[in-house]
Image: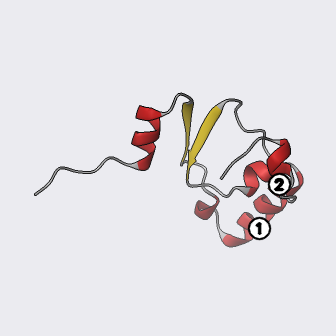
């Protein structure tokens, strides 16, 4: 049986020149649907500033950083 393959997160940490910020613990999927909708609406109006010069990787809704307007992606120097 072959060895276990590394995860994408592990590869990013190993080969990236930037620090990798894991984003797993705050998944909107862990919030019940009614509360999740309220959290998503707040994120649309008030997106979080991503850490500068770092890779954010994990299980999160991009809306957390982009907000309601996709054109913010360029202004915030985000890439998917």
Locate residue 46 relative to residue 32 in the image: left or right. right
Tell me the residue that label 2 is attached to.
Answer: 67
User: In the rendered image of this protein, does residue 39 appear above or below residue 72?
Assistant: below
Residue located farthest toward the left when viewing the structure as drawn: 1
Could you say which quadrant of the image residue 22 lies in? Answer: top right
Q: Residues within 10 Å of mark 1 (few under 14, many from 20)?
A: few
Could you say which quadrant of the image residue 39 lies in? Answer: bottom right
Q: Which mark is residue 78?
A: none
Locate residue 73 relative to residue 62 in the image: left or right. right
Q: Position of residue 13 (x, y in %)?
A: 45, 34
Tell me the residue that label 1 is attached to.
Answer: 37
- Mark 1 or mark 2, which is nearer the start of the sequence? 1
66 or 18, which lies in front?
18
Which of discs 2 and 1 lies nearer the camera? The answer is 2
Q: CA distance from mark 2 to mark 1?
A: 14 Å
Locate residue 52 relative to residue 26 in the image: left or right. right
Q: Secondary structure at mark 1?
A: helix
Q: Position of residue 5 (x, y in %)?
A: 28, 50
User: In the rendered image of this protein, does residue 13 appear above or below residue 4?
Assistant: above
| Residue at 60 percent of width and 38 percent of height | 55
Q: Position of residue 14 (x, y in %)?
A: 41, 33
| Residue at 67 percent of width and 29 percent of height | 53
| Residue at 50 percent of width and 33 percent of height | 16
77 or 42, which lies in front?
77
Could you say which quadrant of the image residue 51 lies in? Answer: top right
User: In the rendered image of this protein, does residue 57 appear above or below residue 63?
Assistant: above
11 or 41, which lies in front?
11
Q: Residues within 10 Å of mark 2 (few under 14, many from 20)?
A: many
Q: Secondary structure at mark 2?
A: loop
């Amino acid at each position: 049986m072959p060895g276990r393959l590394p995860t994408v997160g592990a590869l990013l940490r190993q080969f990236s020149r930037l620090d990798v910020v894991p984003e797993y613990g705050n998944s909107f999927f862990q919030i019940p649907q009614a509360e999740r909708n309220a959290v998503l609406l707040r994120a649309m109006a008030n997106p979080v500033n991503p850490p500068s010069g770092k890779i954010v990787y994990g299980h999160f809704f991009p809306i957390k950083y982009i907000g309601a307007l996709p054109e913010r992606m360029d202004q915030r120097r985000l890439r998917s």
